Amino acid sequence: MIYPIVLFGDPVLRTPTKEIVKGELDTKKLAEEMYQTMYNAHGVGLAAPQIGMSLRMFVIDGSAMDEDIEEAKIAFINPQIIEEEGEEWAFEEGCLSIPSIREDVFRKPKITIRYFDEDWNEKEETFDGIVARIIQHEYDHIEGVLFTDYVSPLKKRLLKGKLTQISKGKVDVTYRVRVPAKK
Ligand code: NI
């Protein structure tokens, strides 16, 4: 099943998510559906809040951005970033929930993360470069943080109109979206 993607302005994107209890849902099936939804939208990462589920889970596949990435397709359940290291670097990020906006975000280049995969194997791994970047972006989603939160106050003012349009569903995308309810 391909889910519609929740757009900026929906409170679910701002709500810190809850941990998944093993056995309460079919994580393998959910991971598969999240991959389908992500690929359908040509994304490289997708977090559960973006399909309206306030759960501590996201999937990534960075191979579209760099074909040298091995083990590109990973599902993260109940992840915890343990360490972030190195000197912050800028990279222009975008988000399926905030279409047509791209902004430079500074993040550390190397992370160590503990998580369960969709089969509930516990893992602890270190990632760097673009994969670390995608994980940091998705990890923010499950904490209720969006990449636009990091831009300067001036940039934020400049983006305000665009963000309002997005929250009203005025977007030009090829995937199905869920428009936030009117306040
Ligand atoms: Ni995003």
Image: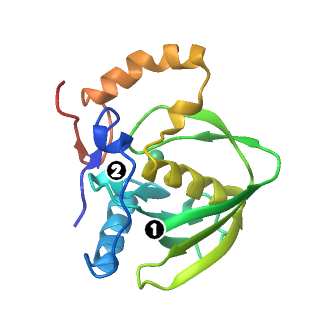
The quadrant of the picture occupied by the C terminus is top left
Dividing the picture into quadrants, the one containing residue 27 is: bottom left
The residue carrying mark 1 is 78
Residue 4 is left or right of residue 108, and the answer is left
Estimate the spatial distance between the alpha carbons at disc 2 and disc 1, rounded to whole Å: 16 Å
Q: Residue at x 50, y 64 (%)?
A: 60
In the rendered view, tell whether residue 17 sits above or below residue 144: below
Instruction: Give the x, y percent position of residue 95.
Output: 46, 43
Instruction: Give the x, y percent position of residue 130.
Output: 66, 56
**Residue labelled 2 has its Cβ within 8 Å of some atom of ligand 1:** yes
Q: Which label was assigned to residue 50?
A: 2
Give the secondary structure at mark 2: helix
Instruction: Give the x, y percent position of residue 173.
Output: 33, 40
Could you say which is closer to the camera, residue 158 or residue 136?
136
Image depth: mark 2 or mark 1 in front: 1
Residue extending farthest to the right is 87
Of the image marks 2 and 1, the number of the one nearer the N terminus: 2
Could you say which is closer to the camera, residue 86 or residue 96?
86
In the rendered view, tell whether residue 60 sits above or below residue 52: below
